Image: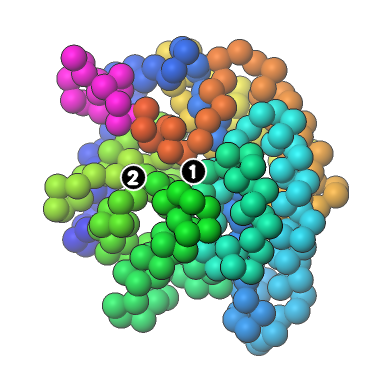
Amino acid sequence: MKPRPYGPFPYSPIIRRPKLSWPDSARVALWVIPNVEFFSLEERPAGYGAAAKIPDVVMWSERDYGNRIGIWRVMEVLDRYSIRASVALNSLLCDHHPVIIEEGNKRRWEWMGHNESNTRRLNDAPPGEEAHIIKRTFATIERATGMRPKGWLSSGLQETWDSLDLLAAEGCRYVCDWCNDDQPYIMHLDDGSRLVSVPYPQQTNDKPAYERMHVSPAEFRDMICRTFDVLYREGADSGRVLPIALHPYISGVPHRIGALDAALEYICRHEGVWRTTGSEIAEFYLSPAAAAHRGEGDGS
């Protein structure tokens, strides 16, 4: 993507779009995105409160808790509501913690690319290295899971001007870094290829909620439920997406896991909720059924 003042898509006010109809007349497409990440003890963790020196044992240990303990609590809750996760996966985890991949595959979880490690960002990569990072990430996840990722979430949601083109070149179908809508939309790249932007949250996301907004577990539960209420009401006129982003080292601790459980119980007791994955949302949006919403005629 060439540098520009606006993204590779037209400005589209939601009040002037054709109706988006989800499968089975659902009002809301619910997808849950655990960020399953690997942090090297030899590198400085990124994020809130990270120290300047390594090894940063305190920050590292908090995150490792998520892969040792928290992820299994998250799996148990998602199993309870028959929700298949769409995992944003650091590819180095495939070699370091393969049992997580094994258990996710048992549940038919989807795996998205999420860089190699969460201690590295695409916009911090040396010149020419970004393409190799993306290529290695897709190849490693495909080898470990048996399926090539269709989606991508950048670590820290950080891209460069080249990221979208590099992702499309690797066969990526959708990206989640652009948190600016409640519905999918098409990104048109300079070479004529396209990607689907699938909504990803900065609000119903445990990391900014707990670490930056300093909400309590009860407040996070209420944030999710109130967000759902609005989207469910609006979804009667045109379908909406409710993404919930989780980090096992945050939501998987004992005093917070109940907030996730309660929020999902509330959502899933409603009719008209499509429990889905990122790739299913993107594939439906590219189908003839959604052609009118994409501004491509009626799909006939």
Furthest toward the right, the residue is 254
User: Magenta includes 289?
Assistant: yes
Asked if residue 88 can be seen in this view, the reply is yes
Please tell me which residue is depicted at 64% across the width and 61% down the height of the picture: 98
Q: Which residue is mark 1?
A: 200
| Residue 232 badge | none
Query: Which badge, 1 or 2, is on the more N-terminal residue?
Result: 2
The magenta stretch is: 285-300
Could you tell whether 252 is left or right of 241 in the image?
right
Q: Which residue is mark 2?
A: 173
Secondary structure under badge 2?
Answer: loop
Whether 118 is drawn above or below 267: the answer is below
Question: What's the distance in space between the residues labelled 1 and 2, CA to CA?
Answer: 15 Å
Q: How far across and how far down the image is residue 140, in percent? A: 47, 63
Residue type at the position of mark 2: Arg
Residue 156 seen in the current view: no
Work out whether 222 lies above or below 51. Answer: above
Circle nearer the viewer, 1 or 2: 2
For the point 29% across and 77% down, which residue is it?
128
Instruction: Rate crowding at label 1 as few (under 14), some (14 to 19) or many (20 or more) other CA atoms within 10 Å.
Output: many
> Looking at the image, do the residues carrying marks 1 and 2 touch, with CB atoms under 8 Å apart?
no
Q: Nearer the viewer, residue 145 or 178?
A: 145
